[in-house]
Image: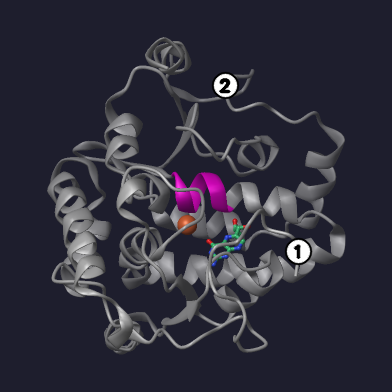
Amino acid sequence: MESYPNLRGDYSHMAADYTIAQDWANYTEKEHARWRMLYARQAKLLKRFAAQEFIDGTATLDAGDGIPDLEVASARLSRATGWRLVAVPGLIPEMDFFAHLARRQFPVTNWIRKADEIDYLVEPDIFHDFFGHVPLLFNPVFADYMQLYGEKGAEANERGTAKILVRLYWYMVEFGLIRTDNGLKAYGAGMLSSAAETKFSIEDKSPNRLRFDLKRVMRTSYKIDDFQETYFVLDSFDELFEATRRDFAPLYDLVQRQPEITPDRVVAGDRVITLGDGSWKHRRAAAA
Ligand code: HBI
Ligand code: FE
């Protein structure tokens, strides 16, 4: 297993595909209460900041009363789009993760963050995975996109371009924005499972917001421990699906021949929706 820095989940008894039993009965009342608090805080923000497709999926899941039983949610989800949820101990190797997506299975971490990690934690917990990722799997186009994305994993691994493919996930699954008749809305799991980044991604003057372009996203690096400096904006989920249907081989060749673009930059050819002033890093430094 590739070395993830100090993994906190229990990886001692999992299946070959990294799945485990969720053991829903083992969650404590304190953990359910923590889930309800996180859920209530995020649910309040959805109407103003989230894409309607995300709001609809959240309503169907109706998981506000406590940590969800993945079997129950899976039954509802598979009726809608044929996706199922599987429990895992936490982060799993990229290739195994891609393989689950290619089989329309979404890996959901079985543990919930501690009380002192409410606002930020490094590894995805069940709140990030379930609240952030599962609602959009009820949307047929996004559900097909996520499987198509997973299918690209094997080729990327053979070509040694998984790092490029992961950028597409980072920017368009974790931190994607979408243009709607009511303005920009968030749909990415990374922002919608974080109160601060949900607001930041839509309202803050600091980040750049650029129109989605597949090659541009593939060229753009990212940092995992702070708000994004650039968000990419879709016109529709169809746009993302159509872009991902393409053969990525020529794109990988192109991207590997060009210099990486750091997340703070805007370059020639970018279709800028809002140009950021980059003030977040100064504000953060001042607050430290
Ligand atoms: N493992 N459980 C889990 N959840 C993820 O979201 C995840 C992962 N392993 C790798 C990974 N994500 C990223 O590299 C994706 O961008 C592929
Ligand atoms: Fe995630």
Name the residue that disc number 1 marks. 2
The image shows residue 16 at horizontal and vertical percentages of 67, 87
Q: What is the crowding at mark 2: few (fewer than 14 residues within 10 Å), some, or many (at least 20)?
A: some
The image shows residue 155 at horizontal and vertical percentages of 78, 67
- In which of the image's four quarters is ligand 1 placed? bottom right
Disc 1 to disc 2, how far (Cα)?
29 Å
- Quick check: 197 left or right of 15? left
Mark 1 and mark 2 in contact? Answer it, CB < 8 Å. no
Does residue 99 appear in this view? yes
Question: Which segment is the magenta one?
Answer: 169-175
Within the magenta stretch, is there residue 184? no
The image shows residue 285 at horizontal and vertical percentages of 46, 14
Callout 2: SS: loop
The image shows residue 218 at horizontal and vertical percentages of 67, 43
* Residue under the point 50% across and 26% down: 229
278 vs 211: above or below? above
* Residue under the point 41% across and 10% down: 286
Q: Amino acid at mark 2?
A: Asp
Callout 1: SS: loop
Dot 2 beta carbon under 8 Å from ligand 1: no
* Residue under the point 27% across and 58% down: 54
Does residue 77 appear in this view? no
Quadrant holding the C terminus:
top left
On residue 108, which mark appears? none
178 vs 35: above or below? above
Of residues 53 and 181, the one nearer the viewer is: 53
